[in-house]
Image (cartoon, rainbow, N blue to C red):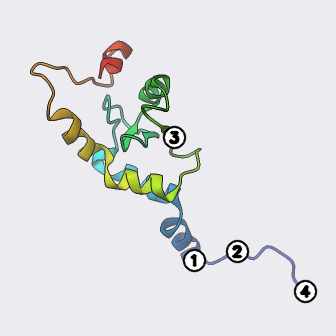
């Protein structure tokens, strides 16, 4: 008998990683233009998420969300944390574009939406 490791064909491995793998679904969501920047400050390549709000956020905004508390905004890392199917579905159903429309529609005139270069205090007010 040959007890060496038998690797599955590439096509079979790809199917498994995209169809049932929450992390693969999240990576696909991050490829969408609206999710390719932090929902809070616009920084490139967000790798965290607020599941409560259904948005992808950068490292700095992730820290701000964590300091607010999990009773307000529950956060996870896309590449490190375990994601339930329910959490992934929430991210798929909201995302940064839908969230932006919802949160920005009632902003007072002259309200400054933070940028990646904004100070932490400006981002915290957002």
Q: Earlier in the sequence, mark 2 or mark 1?
A: 2
Q: Secondary structure at mark 4?
A: loop
Q: Secondary structure at mark 1?
A: helix
Task: Say if 1 sits above or below 70 in the image.
Answer: below
Disc 4 from disc 3: Cα separation: 45 Å
Which disc is residue 93 wearing? none
Distance between the alpha carbons at the discs numbered 4 and 1 = 24 Å
Q: Is residue 29 visible?
A: no
Query: Which residue is rendered at x = 14% and y = 35% of the image?
Result: 105
Q: Earlier in the sequence, mark 4 or mark 1?
A: 4
Residue at image mark 1: 12
Q: CA distance from mark 3 to mark 1?
A: 29 Å
Residue underneath mark 4: 1
Q: Earlier in the sequence, mark 3 or mark 1?
A: 1
| Residue 88: image location, x then y, percent | 45, 54
Real-space CA distance between mark 4 and mark 2, rounded to the nearest whole angstrom: 16 Å
User: Earlier along the polypeptide chain: callout 4 or callout 2?
Assistant: 4
Q: Is residue 39 left or right of residue 106?
A: right
Query: Splitting the image into 4 quarters, where does residue 64 fall?
Result: top left
Numbered badge on residue 7: 2
Which class describes the residues within 10 Å of circle 3: few (<14), some (14-19), or many (20+)?
some
Please give the residue where the numbered disc 3 appears in the rendered image.
76
Label 4 with label 3: CB-CB less than 8 Å: no
The residue drawn where x is 43% and y is 34% is: 73
Where is residue 56? Give x, y as percent.
39, 41
| Number of other residues with Cα within 10 Å of mark 4, as a class: few under 14, some 14 to 19, many 20 or more | few
């Amino acid at each position: 008998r040959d007890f060496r490791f038998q690797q599955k064909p590439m096509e079979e491995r790809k199917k498994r990683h995209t169809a049932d793998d929450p992390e693969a679904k999240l990576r696909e969501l991050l490829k969408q233009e609206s999710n390719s920047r932090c929902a809070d400050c616009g920084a490139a390549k967000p790798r965290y998420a607020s599941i409560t709000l259904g948005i992808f956020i950068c490292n700095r905004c992730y820290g701000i969300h964590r300091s607010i508390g999990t009773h307000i905004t529950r956060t996870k890392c896309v590449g490190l944390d375990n994601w339930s199917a329910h959490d992934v579905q929430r991210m798929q159903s909201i995302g940064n574009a839908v969230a932006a429309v919802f949160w920005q529609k009632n902003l007072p005139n002259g309200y400054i939406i933070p940028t990646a270069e904004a100070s932490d205090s400006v981002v915290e007010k957002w």
